[in-house]
Amino acid sequence: MTMNRQNKTAAQLVGVVVVMGALAWASVPFYNWFCRVTGFGGVTNVATVAGADILDQTIKIRFDASTDRDMPWEFKPMQRTMTLRIGEEGLAFYEAYNPTDKPIAGQASYNVAPYSAGNFFYKIECFCFTEQVLQPGERVEMPVNFYVDPEIVDDRDAKHTNHITLSYTFHQIDLPEQAQAALEDGPANEKNVN
């Protein structure tokens, strides 16, 4: 009877660990989906080109960067602020560096503050649209191309916004299959050469 109770307790503990691991693995994609659906967290919009209207009124864009605690990359904006006319297309760069001796894959989550400005912040191109893989010691500059929709000046909640903060956080993800295959083939090919 004691062994049965111990087996049941062990099975329950394993179940808890599996569920917690699955929740941790799914947290970044789930958070991104939740923000897109609800507009929570200052989620931005996507456009193929900037609009034609450019106002004389300016807005300051602040850039922020961080990494998840388990992400070994160094990640920072290459400029802290930029002032643009509302509707004008902006181009900013972030820098990422992999100081480790192995390839690391990452995916950026993002938000905009104040939240009311998220509906008017449009990204045309962004490194956050795809996963990134950095090789050992690799340093890259990653662009984000954006504009602020002139309709922001007519919005009841956002019209008094004079600055917007664009924040990114990089999370480590599993290496894509292609990168993993190249990593696995590398040592085998080196052995065959010798």
Image: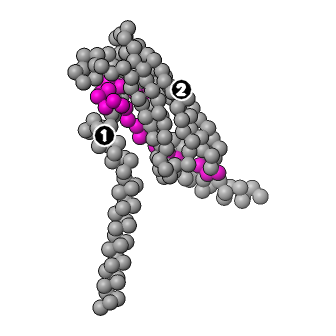
Q: In this view, does 96 lie above or below 29?
A: above
Q: Is residue 49 above or below residue 10?
A: above
- Residue type, numbered disc 1: Cys
Specify whether residue 183 is painted magenta: no
Q: In this view, does 84 lie above or below 42?
A: above
On the rendered image, what quadrant is the N terminus found in?
A: bottom left
Q: Nearest to the eye among marks 2 and 1: give it.
A: 2
Judged from this view, the residue extending furthest toward the right is 194
On the rendered image, what quadrant is the C terminus found in?
A: bottom right
Q: Mark 2 points at which residue?
A: 79
Identify the residue shown where x is 52% and y is 49%.
Answer: 71
Residue 8 % position (x, y): 31, 80
Q: How far apart are marks 2 and 1 (CA)?
A: 26 Å
Identify the residue shown where x is 49% and y is 50%.
Answer: 69
Specify whether residue 108 is painted magenta: yes
The segment highlighted magenta reads 101-125
Q: Residues within 10 Å of mark 2 (few under 14, many from 20)?
A: few
Give the image quarter of residue 50.
top left
Residue 24 % position (x, y): 39, 56
Q: Mark 1 points at which residue?
A: 35
Identify the residue shown where x is 39% and y is 23%.
Answer: 163
Identify the residue shown where x is 30% and y is 19%.
Answer: 160
Q: What element carries label 1?
A: helix
Point out which mark residue 134 bears. Answer: none
Q: How crowded is mark 1: few (under 14 residues within 10 Å), some or many (20 or more)?
A: some
Q: In front here: 48 or 137?
A: 137
Q: What element carries label 2?
A: loop
Q: Can residue 131 be spotted in the picture?
A: no
**Of callouts 2 and 1, which one flags the residue occurring earlier in the amino acid sequence?**
1
- Residue type, numbered disc 2: Gln
Residue 62 % position (x, y): 45, 27
